[in-house]
Image: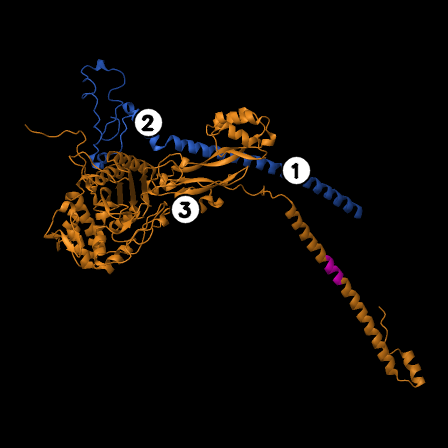
Amino acid sequence: MIRTPLRPLARILSARQKGENPDTIERENLRLRHEEIRDRGRVRAEVRLLFLSLGFLAAFSTIGARMGLLAATEPVEPRSAAAGAQILATRADITDRNGRILATNMQTYALYAQPRDMVDPGRVARELAKIFPEIDPVAMERRLTDGRTFLWIRRVMSPEQMQRVHEIGDPGLLFGPREMRLYPNGTLAAHVLGGASFGAEGVSSAEVIGTAGIEKALDARLRDPAQAGTPLELSIDLTLQAAVEEILGTGMTMLNAKGAAAILMDVKTGEILSLASLPAFDPNDRPNPLTKGDPGDSPLFNRAVQGVYELGSTFKIFTVANAMDLGLVSPETMVDANAPRKWGRFTIREFQNKNYGPLLSVENVIVKSSNVGTANIALMIGAERQAAFFQSLGFFDPTTIELVEAPGARPIVPKRWPDITTITTSYGHGISASPMHLAAAYAAIANGGVKVTPTLLHGGVAQAGPRVMTPETAAASVRMLRGVVEHGTATLGDVPGYQVAGKTGTAEKPNRAGGYDEDKVVNTFASVFPASDPRYVLVVTLDEPVETSGSEPRRTAGWTAVPVAGEIIRRAAPLLGLRPVVEPPPVDGLTAVSN
Amino acid sequence: MRPVFFVLSFLAVMGLAFWAYRENYATQAALREMGRLQDEIAGLREALALQRAEWAYLNRPERLRELATVNFDRLGLLPLEPTQFGAAAQISYPAPMILPGEGAFPTITDPVEVTGQTATELAPSPVDGQFP
């Protein structure tokens, strides 16, 4: 480029000749040059800005077009993605601890109608009534002809019924696929599983939601698509559950009881191996809750978890353990057990107005189940320490077991704690809790004094809960409980080889009038086995049982709940793989006799 | 030189276009195949779930108990009893093998009486496990 000199010689010379200042020429040229530079810079900047804006325009219109495309198209699953484990997104299965199925899903169909497409509504209504007995043909025909465009007819049906609906051959009858919850074992473990039903329903699918039990308590886990492929493993053992329910059912029938419950629990891990409540129901066809009367009479009522009863003498061991833990007594200490004992306007009596006194060792207070002895020990402990001990065992709060019913079963504890409350609660009256609470508290004793939280989920490890009593107290308590079975109120519960230890409890049921019914009792047997190294806790509760083999009806736990519990242990312990401690008797069954 | 370069690059573009065309169709075919397979897997999974449900239903404890009762004559199945546990020490050793010629077979008095190959050649000695 040709650069104009700032001081062109020709113009300078001519200007000098004219007597002008040549510097003005230089300044003029300098100005022109700066203007030229400025103009060039502006053009370049404008071009750059233009390019930049074009670039931005292209980028934003690309993004905008893509967004518009994404918004306007139908969503499709990425076909090229790796096939997930669960192509069928369904509710997760529930299995027992050995992987045997307790709840699974089954493909079935729902039936709906589009009356506008229907050829002959009258014939359809009559044919449907033949297939499904609950359909009234007249009402169905009215519903099919009243001008509506859509109508649900059946939620689920069997393949045979579906085939017969096909054979009606009307274009207005249509099927929608359904995932149905199936409980192949029927009534087994019904109260644990609860049941499921349909939530929001569409033509092509319906959501399955839990309505009770663990199905509702862990609904989010079961519906989580990420975990749909892994079944929920419960701590329940199907074989044990079947054996326990069978024996409990037989016992309930033989003893004319209204209901029964049993809990078998591992004391180290807190896993519930069996949880039975009778009468049971079929979760495949869950009955409706009672609209009137006592909800406790419904088969839906889970006696083991929801049933809050006064548990009677089973509480005595807690009082004695508390006193031993505080160093107030030892198993050999003699306490006053002179019955009947007066306290203010109350009189404390023993069973059948016996008197085990005047003095009784602490061990015999438990073995003979002395109310007066326990009351005197409780008075030594005092209200505050007694309440604190019950609280540490979990008798003040609902259990945390994974059932939707559990948080509602709050124990009934006295609001104030005067001395008479101290006395009655020491032998399990005036305080009500569920059998699950009792099982957890006995598990704390059996577990060497460390609290155990019951759980229904498999895979539990030995729990490191808070310590509620010293290991020595726990061991002494188990020895006393063993004494109850060896030569106390629960001798019928002794199973050779399994060293059953336990405590009976008989509590009269409170009636509407505010008193107690003498011939209506709740019998409980809380047991621990084997006593030398406790591993399992079994709690059996019978509601209003009566044993009629003798001359007069017997209603104490020793005659009702104890033999049932003994039979359960005899059947369950081998299934648990527990080896009997003593040598088995000769197999040939021959007995040596002499003349 | 230049025309050769042009021809070569044109041919390369044509080749790549052909390759891309074929890849496109191969991909679409693979996707269709995968969709079909996934449908098949879903169907099989559904069938499997149904089989499992059926298995669980047929093996429900109630039915097994009934079957054990019905077939008691043939099977003699009873619930597991505590007495069925045993110690390893209670299991007797297998009966000592009876040496040939000492009871299992009649004593051979006359060499002509040999009946087949059963005699001493075949029975292993329990002492050292070697053939005599």
- Quadrant for the N terminus of chain A in the image: bottom right
**Mark 3 residue type:** Ala
Name the dominant secondary structure of the magenta segment: helix
User: Mark 2 packing: few (<14 Cα in 10 Å), some, or many (20+)?
Assistant: few
Pick out the residue farthest to the front.
A513
Closer to us: mark 3 or mark 1?
A: 3
Q: What mark, if any, has residue B67 been given in the picture?
A: 2
**Subunit bearing disc 1:** B
Crowding near the residue tagged with mark 1, few <14, some 14–19, many ≥20 C-alpha atoms within 10 Å: few
Assign the C terminus of chain A to one quadrant of the image: top left
Q: Is residue A277 left or right of residue B99?
A: right
Image chain in blue: B
Whether residue B122 sits left or right of residue A177 in the image: it is: left
**Mark 1 to mark 2 CA distance (whole Å):** 59 Å
Picture layout, residue A332 above or below residue B48: below
Q: Which residue is mark 3?
A: A217
